[in-house]
Image (tube, rainbow, N blue to C red):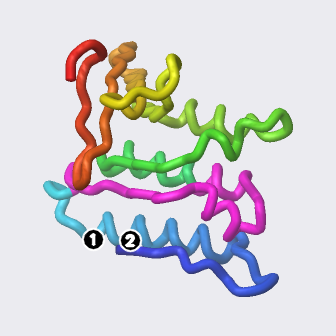
Amino acid sequence: MLKLQCPDGDEGITPEGGLIALYGKIHKTISALPEISWKNVSIIIDDLSLMEVAANGSSDYVLDFLRYCRTLTSEFDCSLITLNHEDIYSSEDRPTFFIQMEYLADILIKAEPLATGLATDVHGQLTVSNKGRNKVSNFHFKVKENVVECFYPGRS
């Protein structure tokens, strides 16, 4: 597992430093695998907002990094999975980052509270948008002790 370490103090991550170096490590790691294994590779970025913090608030650096990683999905037929918190980027002065993220995504999964409010047997709603199939699916979910149970609305 490759990790991007957050620098101390004012060092920050520059495109020449951390993000390009991380991309280089990812590319090198995937390239070293046998071609038959490429489909089984998933590049997972757990929280983009933390990557932006590490890049001294530069969402441009993070978007460039994501675009480079996106090219890997074409080159090596692997997957790119990111976690992003919409509420961080939903302010009027910063919607561009979130819009760019939606543009880069093939499949977008949104977890939201129910539009009707709280319910005891349903904790929220998942909306899955698949651009490739031009399809949107809605599910309800309930969080249990060790699992999340998903089901179609009206069924539990």
* Residue 27 against residue 18 in the figure, above or below: above
Residue nearest the observer in this picture, 152 or 54 = 152
**Residue at the extreme front:** 120
Percent across and percent down for residue 33 are 22, 67
Whether the magenta-drawn stretch holds residue 64 is answered as yes
Q: Quadrant of the N terminus?
A: bottom left
- Total number of numbered discs in the rendering: 2
The prevailing secondary structure element of the residues shown in magenta is helix
Percent across and percent down for residue 14 are 72, 72
- The kind of residue on which mark 1 rests is Ala
Query: Is residue 49 in view from this perspective?
Result: yes
- The kind of residue on which mark 2 rests is Lys
Secondary structure beneath dot 2 equals helix
Residue nearest the observer in this picture, 5 or 34 = 5
Q: Quadrant of residue 29?
A: bottom left
* Residue 97 against residue 113 in the figure, above or below: below
Segment colored magenta: 38-65
Question: Image point 47% across, 24% down: which residue?
Answer: 114
Whether the residues at callouts 1 and 2 have beta carbons within 8 Å, the answer is yes
Residue holding disc 2: 28
Question: Image point 64% across, 56% down: which residue?
Answer: 62
Secondary structure beneath dot 1 equals helix
Q: CA distance from mark 1 to mark 2?
A: 6 Å
Question: Image point 55% across, 47% down: which residue?
Answer: 84
**Residue at the extreme bottom:** 8
Mark seen at residue 32:
1
Question: Image point 52% across, 71% down: which residue?
Answer: 22
Residue nearest the observer in this picture, 21 or 8 = 8
Q: Is residue 124 found left or right of 17 in the rendered image?
A: left
